[in-house]
Amino acid sequence: MLTVQQLSKKIDRQQVLDDIDFTVGAGEIIALVGRNGAGKTTLLRTMVGIIRPDTGDVRYGPSSIFEKAELKRDVIFVPDSADALKHYTVNEAAALYESIYPTFNRSTFRETLTRYNIDNKKIRQLSKGQKAMVTLSLAFAVQAKYYLLDEPTDGLDVVAKSDVLKLMIAQVEVRNCSIIVSSHQLHELERIADRIIMIEKGRVKAIMSLEEARETSVKLQVVFNDQVPVELLERKDIDIINVTGRVALFMAKERTKELDTFVDAHDPMLVEEIPMSLEDIFRVQLGGEASVF
Amino acid sequence: MSFKVLLKKDWKQVSLLWMLLVFLGIVAHTLPVWTQIQSFDEQVREIQENPADYAEWYGDNVTNPSLEELFSPEYSYFIGDLQTLIPYGGVIFLYIIFGFLMASVLIGSERNSQMSDFAMSLPFNRNQLYISKWLIGVSGIVVSSLLGSPLMLWVIQTSRYSFLMEGHALQVAGLAGFMLLTGIAVFSLALWMGSFGGEAVSQVLWSVVALLFPVGILLLIQGSIYSITQNTAGVYDLFERAMESVFLRLISPLANLLNVDTFNMFTDDTVWENFMTVAIISSLGFIVLSFGIGLWTFNRVPQENNGRFFMFTNWLWLVHVIMVICFAMLGGIVLANLSYPTNSILYFVGFAIGGFLAHLLAKRLLYRFNLRLKV
């Protein structure tokens, strides 16, 4: 089990991580979501020992990852670009991984390359999608227990994104490994994530499953008999998405009886609960604007 | 898990420079010897063809001087000696340049790219990462010396000037060893600077500053005292004693180099003994010191400050203060020396101007030229 214990870090006197605490179980896919600058990348880099925390620890089993570097054979970090290996050819990179990680499975790696038609070129000569596939395939061929992926689908086209997601799901299914993935591609995360960790200003705002998140918040489409009441538009606890004539579409951070009573009091013609997407949850919980996704 | 993996990774980064160093090391050890031999040949031919023109130096009785006689210290005409044959300066210059370059590729360039993050995320601790880099750089200098030095001796030994080496083989070997140790010392210094210089250019700048600093600060203090007091003798004596001190030679490879008297080490036993004890031991001492401190700082440096000029941001104030003081003294010395005799009022004016300009420079360099962090 990978445990993050009270992790805190200040950079330039700013609290970038603040008392982060969670556990990753076997076979889980955890989505790490938060607005730009929330601390997601710093958290992942700290979890693998690139950055040292001011306080707190990351433990793999009974040992600290900062004290026993060899534990990192089972905790692999995949950054958002393949820059580190750009001077390597695909085969050279595989040979490097093979020599670092005794569990590296070259045939698994080759299979992926063949499946996605990737030649043995210098990594810098590959397309962005191919680079992402190579770095992920290298990491997954290690057959580690935990993977920390930093925006693995960032900048990829639809097909490449789909390939990356398939690869991730296949790994969890076949090997029961765990993946913590940070991404702004919320509609993709909601298809694969078991749990969501929401980070806001370096703090964990919430850790929950998508179902729990959906139960916590609510998205309603209400058709009123007359105009949309001004009191509704002025409420601070809801996020108005759209108002068209007598129809209002809004989200509330918390599902409360008071809100239900408020809506009922205005005698609506129709109240329909709309299923919340992860993007909706992100927006209502973290107050994000659409432009930051 | 084998430590060789890290060597392999570092080799990939530095292999081109490493091979170039070995090749140029061989050239630097041998080519100047060969050209010096050509120069000797020309001078010898000229003297032997026109002995009368050189009677003033060799005396009338030397009408047909032999090769050995032409190089004899009995005569005042100086063609050259063993130390002119040994390309001491060229080899050390090469080691300084390549020491800086290799160290900046091994650490600084890693910090420029994501290679540094990749390395830190591997199942190795920071000690192993640093030691691997040190070993790969040192191996380049050692191989270059191990190939170059014997070839240099061979070129001398097979030339008609081999008699210059007679009885001095140990001194020549000692000098070759000193060149090697200086190369390793400079590389270790540059690697240490990379442990807190946030990227390749910063690392090279820090390396230059660190190489010059101990001697430079002495020169600045000497110049300042002289500019204010006009006391030449006392200041010069103080400076000489400080420059020759074992402490300075231990903490500065440059001071150690400047104190080696290659001119007299083949003829004067005291100089030779001083070389074998103080010079060699100071070099060894500096290697141990810089490697140890480098390892310590590499372990503790905040990795999140990659890309910054100085990664220990809590100590920026100290760098700022030192920069201001050094540039202030330099400004003072320059301005004071515009008049003769030096003018102490001008010194203080220059001190203020230099200090102010350095303060502006430091603010820009230390606080503004920082990369934005991704959090």
Image (cartoon, grey):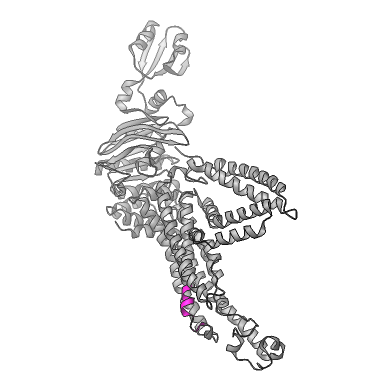
Identify which residue is drawn at 43% across, 57% down. B289
Q: Is residue B187 above or below residue A163?
A: below
Q: Give the quadrant of the C terminus of chain B.
A: top left
Snapshot quadrant of residue B53: bottom right
Locate the N terminus of chain B by quadrant. bottom left
| Identity of the residue furthest to the right in this view | B340
Q: Image height check: is B42 above or below A148? A: below
Which segment did they paint magenta? B165-174
Q: Left or right of B139: which side holds B152?
A: right
Residue B356 appears at what percent x and percent y? 65, 42
Point out residue B201 in the picture as x, y percentages from the top left corner: 54, 52
Q: Is residue B167 magenta?
A: yes
- Residue under the image location 40 percent in, 44 percent down: A79
Image x and y of residue A42, in percent: 41, 38
Using the rendered image of the protein, determine whether residue B9 is visible from the camera's viewpoint: no
Indicate the quadrant where residue A165 lies: top left
Report if residue B67 lies within the magenta region. Answer: no
Question: In terms of secondary structure, what is the magenta stretch mainly?
Answer: helix
The foreground one among A167 and A98 is A98
Is A124 left or right of B369, judged from the image as shown?
left
Task: Check the image and report above or below for B15 versus B159.
Answer: above
Q: Quadrant of residue B142?
A: bottom left
Q: Which residue corresponds to the image point at 65% horizontal and 92% vertical from the top-left?
A: B62
Regarding residue B219, the answer to whether it shows in the image is: yes
In this picture, is A106 found above or below B307? below
- Of residues B70 and A112, the one nearer the viewer is B70
Q: How many marks?
A: 0
